[in-house]
Amino acid sequence: QVQLVESGGGLVQAGGSLRLSCAASASIFSINVMGWHRQAPGKQRELVAVITSSGATKYADSVKGRFTISRENANNTVYLQMNSLQPEDTAVYYCNADRFRRGNDWGQGTQVTVSS
């Protein structure tokens, strides 16, 4: 299993920014896909952004142009830079490490609340 620890969540006003961090217990070079998902109250968990071991990225349409996922292999950390935040972005954000048949692990989540 890969242990994941998220940080950086908090309360921010609409239009503001936050940067989430996800520290992994293993080299992210060996993890096929790392990403961020979020779950708002009463809604299903949805994909926000992913990044592959080769650096390819993909974003949900709802965050495209506002959020940026990146990685720092040296410290086994994945980041999610969130700009122009809106109340609709309010959710618990979870870090995910997908190693395909080798495992799929999740962090404990970090709360992001955007006030109007």
Image (cartoon, rainbow, N blue to C red):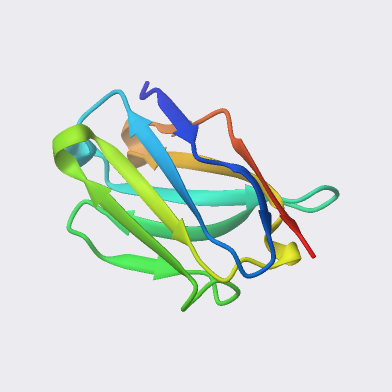
Q: Give the tally of numbered discs.
A: 0
Task: Judge from the rendering whether residue 45 lies leftward or rightward of residue 57; answer left or right.
Answer: right
Front-most of residues 27 and 67: 67
Q: Quadrant of the N terminus?
A: top left
Q: Residue furthest right?
A: 42
For the point 24% across and 35% down, the residue is 76
- Location of residue 21 with respect to 106 vertically, above or below: below
For the point 49% across and 50% down, the residue is 36
For the point 17% across and 42% down, the residue is 73
Task: Judge from the rendering whether residue 54 lies leftward or rightward of residue 42; answer left or right.
Answer: left
- Location of residue 80 with respect to 111 vertically, above or below: below
Q: Position of residue 24 (x, y in %)?
A: 33, 30
- Location of residue 101 with respect to 56 vertically, above or below: above
Q: Position of residue 86 (x, y in %)?
A: 69, 68
Front-most of residues 80 and 105: 80
Q: Quadrant of the C terminus?
A: bottom right
Task: Judge from the rendering whether residue 37 lies leftward or rightward of residue 11; answer left or right.
Answer: left
Tell me where residue 94 sits by quadrant: top right
Tell me where residue 97 sits by quadrant: top left
Q: Position of residue 44 (x, y in %)?
A: 74, 52
Tell me where residue 96 sits by quadrant: top left
For the point 30% across and 56% down, the residue is 70
